[in-house]
Amino acid sequence: MESKMIIDDECSRSEEANLQKQPSFRRDLGFRPQKELVYNKLLPYADQLDVESRVWLAEIKGNLGRAVMLRELKPGCVFWSSQLNIYIKLYGMKFSKEDHIAFVKLMYELITIPNLEPNLINKFTTTMLQLLKKKELISPNELELPWRPLYEIIHPLLKEKSSEIYRRPSWLKDILYCMIRSIKNYFPLNATQEILDELRPTFCPLDNKTMCVSLQTLECFLPLQLPPEHHSIGHQLWFEEFMTLWKVCHNGPLWENNMMWLMARLAHNNIGYIDWEPHFPLMFTRFIRCLHLPVTYKQTQSNKVHKLDTASIATWIVAVLVRWLHD
């Protein structure tokens, strides 16, 4: 028994020694902070910040967990999530990676509560955006979040009609889009195929409204930053199909701008991995017509009007030019 206790003590000492050898390990805090605000060290009371932040973080964790267990959304979860938001603004990501991941998962579960009030969604989403501001701190291998609960929240907003009695705030859809774009890097690897299976049946090029909603949802949900080894289960599942669809619909449909934003974000997130050269005639023909440049063919100018955002055009051109400059 004594030998076993000695071995356990030696193991615990070795684990503690290995932990303390990690870069940026803070022995006074007991963990390695994710990312502190470096400017706090310049404050005249910088030596007191560690104790102050440690006490406040423990209070936030304890009370937020207690509010969740008691199912007290208001004022418990709302107040302490706001306190967490203030903590991040004052101290940065001054908590361990385990706490960081736990906070993200907790906010996700709160946001995806069925029939949650828009005001509460706004509160929890604001905190979630603060937690995911530095995406490099949590890799997709360390965190996985399902996409369907978010789709179930935003899908009714897209189908909502102006004649309905109950109408959600106009800003709700925008803040949800912003949050989904921040967390879609953490969707499962099979999410691309599942999202396509869900939305492909809604494609109808002749129905501009339905097509706009479908492409806007795809642009928001599709993971566009997968590593190269997973491209076969990422954009390669839909890229050529969507470009062919865009090519055959050359009459300037209203959903063309949504398609342009999807391709612009894809190019921006995969610089050098996609061969855009076969699609140059299609893309630049659309750009010329959109900008109303005086370009004619056999002294005849096309009367087709393609309405594309100049921001999406610029994003795509810059992303493609970067690859050509490196080549």
Image (cartoon, rainbow, N blue to C red):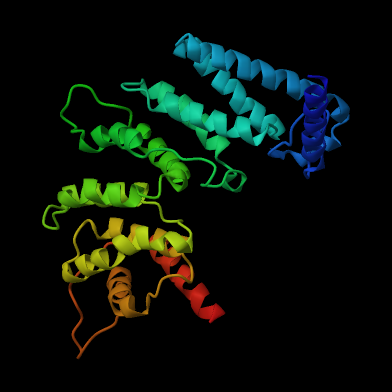
Q: How many marks?
A: 0
The extreme bottom residue here reads: 298
Decide if residue 160 is in sight here.
Answer: yes
**Residue at image x 43%, y 38%?**
145
The answer to whether any part of residue 216 appears in the image is no
Quarter of the rendering containing residue 117? top left
Percent x, y of residue 54: 74, 23
Q: Nearer the viewer, residue 1 or 260?
A: 1
Q: Quadrant of residue 261?
A: bottom left
Q: What residue is at 59 percent from the left and 13 percent from the top?
A: 63
Left or right: residue 11 versus residue 205 is: right
User: Which residue is at 43% across, 21% downward?
Assistant: 120
User: Is 134 located above or below residue 113 in the figure?
Assistant: below
Image coordinates of residue 152 in percent, x first then y, are 28, 33
Whether 4 is drawn above or below 272: the answer is above
Q: Quadrant of the N terminus?
A: top right
Relative to residue 198, is residue 189 drawn left or right? Answer: right
Q: Is 41 on the left or on the right of 137, as rendered? A: right
Q: Nearer the viewer, residue 65 or 157?
A: 65
Q: Residue 184 location in percent, x, y?
A: 43, 45
